[in-house]
Image: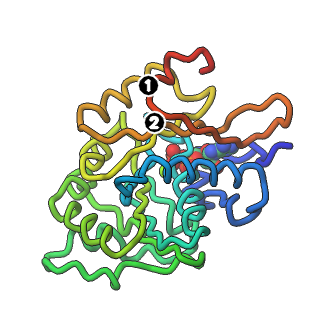
């Protein structure tokens, strides 16, 4: 069973059509179940110290960050937690398309406003999914890295963590721009998305290195697009701890 027909243009697909929300469209599917397993694993890691601000990132583009992030946000909201999904990929934003909400105001609006006060009500929008709110990216700024690395962004993350049970950020890839490296320092945890057969091993290593340099708390990795011989899923997920992944023979 191939869940997706790969006949579309992957490079702009999520930007034009949004991420595919399998957790909503087919919550009983194997893939939705895999997202719930990842959710459980994250829970187990945060028994003593709740992980409230989390990002899924990857070495490069098109590895499934936005798809994994949106589905994980839904999976967490589905268990009744109050979840906020923030689109912090200011260059390739997708959250407004995925959830069909306006992007006229968003993260960049608040980060570039001259007023010191963070008025969340102005930019937080209901996603249409119970328990899940979103902050879209907002108008594309000339200086995305500067905005994401600003003190204001840190302050925003702090106020959001008080208002929600979990804040999940959709972030840019690690190796092309510095945004995520800078941002990950201020998050409780970061999970690396690895797309099977696409992400080169050297890129995974460099991505892990970049996260270590910024002293990010690397929680593990999500293997996207896992090939499965028996079922032939076009869309599978696995989850691993640690980052010894690149030593494994299964690339
Ligand atoms: N497991 C998968 N199987 C098939 N297509 C996928 C899978 N994961 C992502 N895609 C597709 O790959 C493209 C990039 O996904 P996206 O989530 O936007 O990645 P990123 O945010 O890392 O750039 C999109 O067209 C998306 O639909
Ligand atoms: Mg993306």
Above or below: residue 194 compared with residue 139: above
Write down the residue under mark 2.
Answer: 60
Residue at image coords 71%, 53%? 33
Question: Closest to the observer: 88 or 163?
Answer: 163
Residue 191 left/right relative to 118: right
Above or below: residue 48 compared with residue 122: above
Q: Residues within 10 Å of mark 1 (few under 14, many from 20)?
A: some
Question: Closest to the observer: 234 or 243?
Answer: 243
Question: Closest to the observer: 209 or 150?
Answer: 209
Element type at mark 1: helix
Count all numbered tags in the image, as a single digit: 2
Residue 204 left/right relative to 226: left
Tell me: is circle 2 under 8 Å from ligand 1.
yes
Above or below: residue 2 compared with residue 115: above
Q: Earlier in the sequence, mark 2 or mark 1?
A: 2
Residue at image coords 22%, 58%? 147
Write down the residue under mark 1.
Answer: 203
Can you give x and y, in whole percent of width and height, for residue 171 in the image?
40, 51
Rendered image coloring scheme:
rainbow
The quarter of the rendered structure image containing the N terminus is top right
- The disc placed on residue 250 is none
Residue at image coords 76%, 49%? 30
Of all residues shown, which one is farthest toward the front?
48
Can you give x and y, in whole percent of width and height, for residue 204 in the image?
45, 27
């Amino acid at each position: 069973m191939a869940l997706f027909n790969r006949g579309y243009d992957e490079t702009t697909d999520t930007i034009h059509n949004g991420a595919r929300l399998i957790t909503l469209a087919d919550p009983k599917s194997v893939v939705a179940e895999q997202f719930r397993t990842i959710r459980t694993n994250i829970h187990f890691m945060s028994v003593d110290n709740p992980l409230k601000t989390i990002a899924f990132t990857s070495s490069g583009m098109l590895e499934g960050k936005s798809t994994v992030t949106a589905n994980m946000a839904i999976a967490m909201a589905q268990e009744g937690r109050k979840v906020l999904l923030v689109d912090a990929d200011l260059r390739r934003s997708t959250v407004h398309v995925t959830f069909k909400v306006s992007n006229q105001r968003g993260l960049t609006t608040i980060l570039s406003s001259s007023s010191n006060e963070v008025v969340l009500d102005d930019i937080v929008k209901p996603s249409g999914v119970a328990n899940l709110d979103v902050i879209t990216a907002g108008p594309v700024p000339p200086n995305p890295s500067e905005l994401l690395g600003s003190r204001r962004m840190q302050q925003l993350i702090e106020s959001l963590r008080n208002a929600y049970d979990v804040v999940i950020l959709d972030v840019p890839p690690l190796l092309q721009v510095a945004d995520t490296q800078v941002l990950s320092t201020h998050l409780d945890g970061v999970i690396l998305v690895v797309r099977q057969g696409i992400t080169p091993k050297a890129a995974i290593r460099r991505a892990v290195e970049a996260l270590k340099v910024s002293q990010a708390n690397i929680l593990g990795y999500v293997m996207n697009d896992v090939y499965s011989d028996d079922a032939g899923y076009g869309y599978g997920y696995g989850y691993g701890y640690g980052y010894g992944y690149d030593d494994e023979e299964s690339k």
